[in-house]
Amino acid sequence: MTSVDIDLSAPSSPSSRLTKSRSSAEVAELILKAGVIKTYESEPFIFTSGAHSPVYVNIRGLLSEVESRERICAILAEECADIAAADPVDVLIGGETAGIPFAAIAASKIGLPMGYARKKAKAFGMKEMIEGLNASGRRAILVEDLTTDGQSKVSFAEQIRGCGCTLNWVASIFYYGIYPNAEQIFAGADLSLRYLCDWSDILAAARRIGGLPAARIDALGDFLKNPTGWRP
């Protein structure tokens, strides 16, 4: 049995705080082709809330899948550039740990400096919260691999802002899209989320091109209708 530290709830509706990339269908297909969507075998994935899930997404797995990684990071970079066109930024900051490589690749594609935010400051040396740059006076986008309900993004935002940096946006490759309180969480922190795809895109892509066993595609559809009550 696999345990995952996530609490599931019902689907959230789109809002101006939570905006999806126009390339979401392409990203979902690339994620499926990269093989980073894991489906259960004999037992489902179990979340700390006790909820069951037929699927788990491991975005870190994209790092070893060069073709999918490069195209997805190019789209991520385009989305960051689009954000910057309306709300100028001068740095990308990756969240420790999985956001760091994606921030580095995206930053290199659009010619911006990058750094990364620690979950907590080191207890020795420089004791920095933000590594790689002096964040004071900068305007940043927080780059992450995955977003669930947004709570961890708020924690990063508080730390980044505490270093004197302006942070209005999070850019995430994957967003679960099943949390009714996500919009409230982001709005309460004065944050907006731009994401490349969510579970609904994965389900649609799997029905188009495969990439998941047929029974698991059906299970994913059932799970998205009732994420807290789903059972195999």
Image (cartoon, helix red, strand yellow):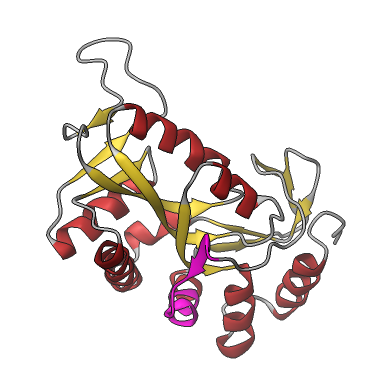
25 w.r.t. 65: above or below: below
x then y, percent, for residue 187: 56, 49
Identify the magenta region: 16-30
Q: Which is more toward the observer, 147 or 62?
A: 147
Q: Seen from this angle, which residue lies furthest top? A: 124
Is residue 189 covered in magenta? no
Residue 19 within the magenta-colored segment of the rendering: yes
In the displayed image of the protein, which residue is found farthest to the left?
Answer: 111
Position of 29 relative to 145 (above/below): below
Quarter-wise, where is residue 76 in the image? bottom left
State the image coordinates of residue 166 (x, y, percent, origin top left): 30, 41
Quadrant of image for the N terminus: top right
In-image side of 19 versus 124 (left or right): right
Answer with left or right where residue 191 lies relative to residue 127: right
Q: Which residue: 64% across, 76% down? A: 203
Q: Residue furthest bottom?
A: 208
Q: Is residue 25 above or below residue 64?
A: below
Q: Is residue 128 left or right of residue 43?
A: left
Q: Residue at x 72, y 60 (%)?
A: 41
**Viewer-proximal residue, 126 or 166?**
166
